[in-house]
Image: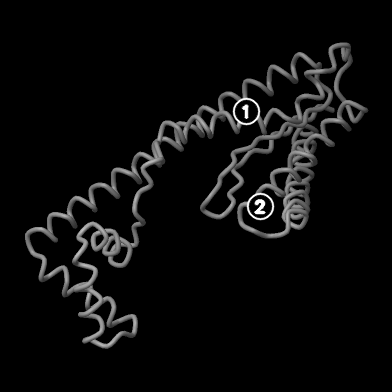
């Protein structure tokens, strides 16, 4: 009975971090076949996710820049209307009309700050971080996908004398252990990013990722029995 399972996805840690990852478990296949399938799928998916990351980041950046240019033009050519809109926003938030006018007049003394706040309050668009570059984000996605996704495959990469067909043996056990380590490590790092106990976040990631992997394994095993 042959089993081939691929678990892939993207781990998101709030809005601050996203780590693409892909884990492979294969059974009853030769080591060379395991590595061929694994690396082909890993590189292909890493490239696809990197391209998707670039396109989405580029679209988001272009949209934000377009909206910012439009708002800047409106502030320059019709400042009274823009100030009135901001007053209405602050009144809706609970300020009195007089206080809202004072706040808006104060903000308008710095038009760049006024523009940033108006983008957030009216359009829900945060000021763009100049350090965020779409192609860099795509490269990070590709590299992190390769590194984390290939981690469990180290068991088969390092097993140079492993010539038999893969099964639920010691090499498979090592691959499972590496997967568990990768999941816990990612969860612990996520905990540091979102400021929750690292061990709690690591354990949560390990349990969720483990259940997903076990489910995927048995689905793959069941489908292979139908072939």
- Where in the figure is residue 183, as x and y percent of width and height? 74, 43
Task: Residue at 68%, 38% (x, y): give it.
Answer: 7
Residue 206 in the image: above or below residue 104: above
Q: Is residue 101 above or below residue 190?
A: below
Going 35% across and 46% down the picture, which residue do you hit? 60
Q: Name the residue under label 1.
A: 146
Q: Circle 1: is it few (<14), some (14-19), or many (20+) Cα within 10 Å?
A: many
Q: Is residue 98 left or right of residue 177?
A: left
Q: Which of 16 and 20 is in front in this view?
A: 16
- Give the spatial CA distance, label 2 vs label 1: 22 Å
Q: What element carries label 2?
A: helix
> What kind of colouring is applied to the model shown?
one colour
Where residue 125 appears, as percent x and y from the top left, is 34, 57
Mark 2 neighbour class, 10 Å CA radius: few under 14, some 14 to 19, many 20 or more: some
Report x, y in % for residue 160. Answer: 84, 12
Q: Quadrant of residue 2?
A: top right
Instruction: Name the residue nearer the viewer: 112 or 177.
Output: 112
| Extreme residue in the right direction | 170
Q: Is residue 227 visible?
A: no
| The N terminus, quarter of image | top right
């Amino acid at each position: 009975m042959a089993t081939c399972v691929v678990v892939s996805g993207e781990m998101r840690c709030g809005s601050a971090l996203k780590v693409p990852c892909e884990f492979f478990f294969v059974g009853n296949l030769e080591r060379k076949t395991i590595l061929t399938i694994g690396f082909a799928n890993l590189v292909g998916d890493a490239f696809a996710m990197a391209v998707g990351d670039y396109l989405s980041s580029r679209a988001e950046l272009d949209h934000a820049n377009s909206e910012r240019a439009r708002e800047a033009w409106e502030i320059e050519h019709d400042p009274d209307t823009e100030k009135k809109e901001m007053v209405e926003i602050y009144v809706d938030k609970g300020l009195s009309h007089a206080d809202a006018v004072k706040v808006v007049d104060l903000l308008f003394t710095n038009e760049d700050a006024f523009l940033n706040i108006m983008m957030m309050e009216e359009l829900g668009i945060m000021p763009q971080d100049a350090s965020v570059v779409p192609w860099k984000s795509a490269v990070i996605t590709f590299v992190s996908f390769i590194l984390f996704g290939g981690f469990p495959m180290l068991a088969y990469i390092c097993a140079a004398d492993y010539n038999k067909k893969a099964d639920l043996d010691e090499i498979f056990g090592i691959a499972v252990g590496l997967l568990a380590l990768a999941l816990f490590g990612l969860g612990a790092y996520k905990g540091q990013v979102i400021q929750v106990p690292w061990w709690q976040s690591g354990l949560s990631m390990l349990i969720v990722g483990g259940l997903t992997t076990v489910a995927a394994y048995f689905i793959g095993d069941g489908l292979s029995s139908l072939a």
